[in-house]
Amino acid sequence: MRTAPTILHLDMDAFYASAEQAAKPSLRGKAVVVGGLGPRGVVATASYEARRFGVHSAMPMGQARRLAPNAAYLVPRFSFYRQISDQVMRLLRELSPLVEPLSLDEAFVDLEAGGVAADEAAARAVGERLRADILRVTGLSGSVGLAVSKMLAKIASEQAKPDGLLLISPGTERELLAPMTVRTLPGVGPATGDHLRRAGITTVGELAEAGEDELVRLLGKAHGGSLYAMALARDERPVVAERDTKSVSVEDTYDVDIHDRVRVRMEVARLADRCVQRLRDAGHSGRTIVLKVRRFDFSTLTRSETLRGPTDDPGVVREAAARLLESVDTTGGVRLLGVGVSGLADYTQEDLFAQAQAQADAEAEAEAGVGGGVAGAGAEGVVG
């Protein structure tokens, strides 16, 4: 564990909505909600003016409209937000070579690796200067957390919102965490929170007091052990500049359930093509094709098929997705479809050899009268 608060976490304030307000003077000081505007749309970001009415991210758009009928409702402009994000990330990379983006509006920075801060005073000065530079360059505000670990820096930036900076001094971490709700810790969602509450544990301090053995008994070895470590403010994760992409996927939610099986097949083929384009843009190929289907009753199924070699061939991905669809009952209607590729690899000559070998194997099987195609896999369904 570090001895100085040299891990910085930046989180831009109400990023999408703030970007729209900065671009359109008529929206400044007004309630702005950005998200999907269809009947099943959800809120991506709400300005702080809209949050006063109870609107928040991930809320159904219909509910948001009831709470704030006079707000401005806008469709996201991701290319515009990415341009602003690129400006912010450039400022972060001027501080350190170790910048770990989490999204367009959020990132960790290792100030120690950049040689710009070795103690508390220097870290605070860097954080304040960063906030001023972001405001100067983009016209937007961001909140900064500084601490000895990633977990604590992220908690600090959340506490600093909006438009603030919080530095957690080394040695004060457990005192700060103790009164906070267990939901403050990463990995504690509604289900885990309810489980802990039923056991009489509602704060981080109570987690620490419960002890590791009790948490392992309640939550299992991995989850219980990690939560106990976090309750003691232990987090040794480094800032990682390059985050490995594990999968590439696309999905669409439909305003009206799709009942026509032919239309479902067409949508899956279209999504497969979009997924492959994204795969190629990232310079990857992949072995496992994944189909996601959310049905009329909100049950979600996934099916997967693993190929013998990595591919970025749209025909191969379309055919695999179509095969996976055959094992899914879409009676009653479909509200969401998605196609993804995982098991990624950089597209190298080895991948070409693997595909050639897979094709040769398939042809040999056909000549021998053995059924089967290029792919061989087990399909597994998961209800979510």
Image (spheres, helix red, strand yellow):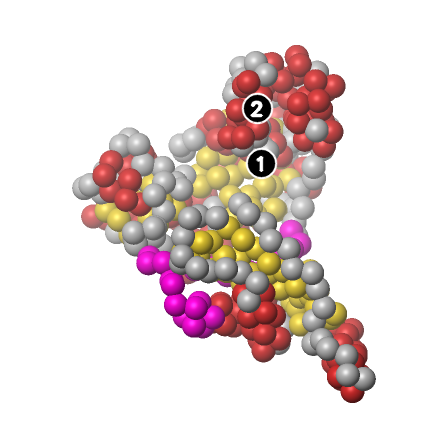
On the picture, is 120 further left or further right than 361? left
Q: Residue at coordinates 58% horizontally, 36% vertically from top-left? A: 8
Residue denoted by label 1: 8
Please say whether residue 259 is one of the residues in the magenta stretch.
yes
Q: Rate crowding at label 2 as few (under 14), some (14 to 19) or many (20 or more) other CA atoms within 10 Å.
A: some
Q: How many marks overall?
A: 2
Please say whether residue 196 is one of the residues in the magenta stretch.
no
Question: What amino acid type is highlighted by mark number 1?
Answer: Leu
Relative to 353, is 342 above or below?
above
Residue 196: image quadrant is top right
The span from disc 1 to disc 2 (Cα, nearest Å) is 32 Å
Asked whether residue 30 appears in the rendered view, the answer is no
Of badges 1 and 2, nearer the viewer stands: 2
Q: Residue at coordinates 62% horizontally, 64% vertically from top-left? A: 289
Residue denoted by label 2: 195
Q: Start and end of the magenta stretch? A: 243-266
In the image, residue 91 lies at what x, y percent? Answer: 52, 48
Task: Give the SS element for disc 2.
Answer: helix
Residue 142: image quadrant is top left
In this rendered view, identify the residue nearer to me: 189 or 350. Answer: 189
On the picture, is 70 further left or further right than 16? left
Q: Residue at coordinates 69% horizontally, 76% vertically from top-left? A: 373
